C-alpha cells in the first residue's frame, strides 16, 4: 500500500526544548514525553479475543516512558457493538492481553486499558442470545455511515435498564478493571466526551456537564481525565468552536489529557500554555508508529489511509506504516 508523506522538513532547532517532549510525572509514572497513543476503535480482534498481531502494533508505538492507551475494550458480552473488537471479561481474553502489555513494558512503555460499554450503539447480532442492546433509553438510533463513508451501522431498538439492573453493569466495569490489571495494565483512568454530538449523544449543556464530571472525579482520586476538544463534536470532523477544555482542566486535580485533531504545532502550544498536561494522538499515531521521534525532528509524517481504519486485516493499515529509518 502506497504511503505518501506530508510536506515538511527536518528542523535544525530540534535540540531546543519541545513542550511535547518534556517529561511529566503522572502519579507514580514518570513519563518521558507528553505524546499519548489515543484509545481508538480498532477492529483487528476475533471472537472478542485480542490477536498476536496486536503485540506488534502496540510494541511499534511504545517508547521508554511513553503512555499508550488501548483500543476500546468491552466489559461484558452485552458491551459489544462493532465487529472484531476485543473484550476483557473472560479468562481467554485476559491471557491474550498479557503478551501485548508485556511487549509494551519490555520497551519501557506504560499501558492502560480503555474499557467500555457501547450501550444502544449495537444490534441483536452482537448481543448474547440475540437480545436487545441495553441502554438508559429505549429510543432507537438511526443508521449511521462509518468514517470510511462506505459501511453503514444498523442499530436495534434498545432495552431501557431498570434501576435495579444498573448495579450489574457497574459490576461488569469493576470486574473488567480488575481483569485489566491482571493482564498487566498499569492503572485505570477515565475518558469523557461532554461536547460529542455523534451517534445522537449531544447534551443540552455540555460545558456544565463536563465541568460537573471533572469536579466529581476528584473525590475518587482518578489518575487522569481524558477529554476531547469541542471542535471535534462530530466524528472525524474538525470545526471552529467557541468552547475549550480549560475550565475542566482547571477543575480536575489529576492529570489532564486533551485530544481532538491536534498536530505538532498546536499540541506544543497547548502544553506550553498549560492548557493540558498530555496530548493524545489517534490517526497520526496510527500512521506514524515513531510519532515522538518525528515530532522531535519535525520530520515528514505518513498520511493515514482512512479506507483501512476498520478492516480486520492483521497487517494492512495497522502494522505496515513505515518508520523514518525505513524510508528510502
Image (cartoon, rainbow, N blue to C red):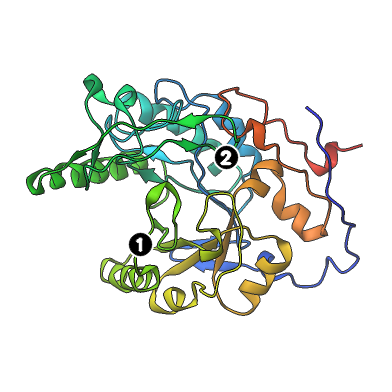
Quarter of the picture containing the C terminus is: top right
Q: Which residue is mark 1?
A: 203
Q: Nearer the viewer, residue 301 or 66?
A: 301
Helix, strand or loop at mark 2? loop
Q: Which residue is mark 2?
A: 147
On the picture, is 205 further left or further right than 290? left
Q: Is residue 91 above or below residue 176?
A: above
Helix, strand or loop at mark 1? loop
Q: Nearer the viewer, residue 152 or 262?
A: 152
Q: Are marks 2 and 1 in contact (CB under 8 Å)?
A: no
Residue, x 51% and y 65% (percent of image)? 230
Instruction: Tally the marks.
Output: 2
Q: Is residue 287 above or below residue 206?
A: above
Residue, x 45% and y 50% (percent of image)? 198
Judged from this view, the residue extending furthest toward the front is 142
Q: Earlier in the sequence, mark 2 or mark 1?
A: 2
Residue, x 51% and y 36% (percent of image)? 145
Quarter of the picture containing the N terminus is: top right
Circle number at residue 11? none
Distance from Cα at disc 2 to Cα at disc 1? 22 Å
Q: Callout 1: 10 Å neighbours few (<14), some, many (20+)?
A: few
In the rendering, at what x and y percent does residue 282 appear? 60, 49
Q: Quadrant of residue 296?
A: bottom right
Amino acid at each position: 500500500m502506497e504511503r505518501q508523506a506530508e510536506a515538511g522538513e527536518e528542523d535544525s532547532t530540534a535540540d531546543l526544548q519541545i513542550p511535547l517532549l518534556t517529561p511529566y510525572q503522572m502519579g507514580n509514572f514518570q513519563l518521558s514525553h507528553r505524546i499519548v497513543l489515543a484509545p481508538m476503535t480498532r477492529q483487528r480482534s476475533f471472537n472478542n479475543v485480542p490477536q498476536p498481531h496486536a503485540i506488534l502494533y502496540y510494541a511499534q508505538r511504545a517508547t521508554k516512558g511513553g503512555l499508550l492507551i488501548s483500543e476500546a475494550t468491552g466489559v461484558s458480552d452485552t458491551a459489544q457493538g462493532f465487529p472484531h473488537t476485543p473484550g476483557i471479561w473472560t479468562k481467554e481474553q485476559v491471557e491474550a492481553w498479557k503478551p501485548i502489555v508485556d511487549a509494551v513494558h519490555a520497551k519501557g512503555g506504560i499501558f492502560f486499558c480503555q474499557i467500555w460499554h457501547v450501550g444502544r450503539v449495537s444490534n441483536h447480532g452482537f448481543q448474547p442470545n440475540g437480545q436487545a442492546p441495553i441502554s438508559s433509553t429505549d429510543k432507537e438510533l438511526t443508521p449511521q455511515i462509518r468514517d470510511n463513508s462506505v459501511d453503514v451501522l444498523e442499530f436495534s431498538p434498545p432495552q431501557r435498564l431498570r434501576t435495579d439492573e444498573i448495579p450489574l453493569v457497574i459490576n461488569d466495569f469493576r470486574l473488567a478493571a480488575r481483569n485489566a490489571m491482571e493482564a498487566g495494565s498499569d492503572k485505570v483512568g477515565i475518558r469523557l466526551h461532554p461536547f460529542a454530538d455523534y451517534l445522537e449523544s449531544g447534551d443540552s449543556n455540555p460545558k456544565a456537564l463536563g465541568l460537573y464530571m471533572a469536579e466529581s472525579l476528584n473525590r475518587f482520586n482518578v489518575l487522569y481525565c481524558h477529554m476531547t476538544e469541542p471542535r471535534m463534536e462530530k466524528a472525524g470532523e474538525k470545526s471552529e468552536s467557541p468552547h475549550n477544555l480549560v475550565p475542566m482542566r482547571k477543575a480536575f486535580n489529576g492529570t489532564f489529557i486533551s485530544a481532538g485533531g491536534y498536530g505538532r504545532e498546536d499540541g506544543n502550544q497547548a502544553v506550553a500554555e498549560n492548557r493540558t498536561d498530555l496530548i493524545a494522538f489517534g490517526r497520526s499515531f496510527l500512521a506514524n508508529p515513531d510519532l515522538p521521534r518525528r515530532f522531535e525532528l519535525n520530520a515528514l509524517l505518513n498520511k493515514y489511509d482512512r479506507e483501512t481504519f476498520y478492516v480486520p486485516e492483521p497487517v494492512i493499515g495497522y502494522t505496515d506504516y513505515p518508520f523514518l529509518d525505513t524510508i528510502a
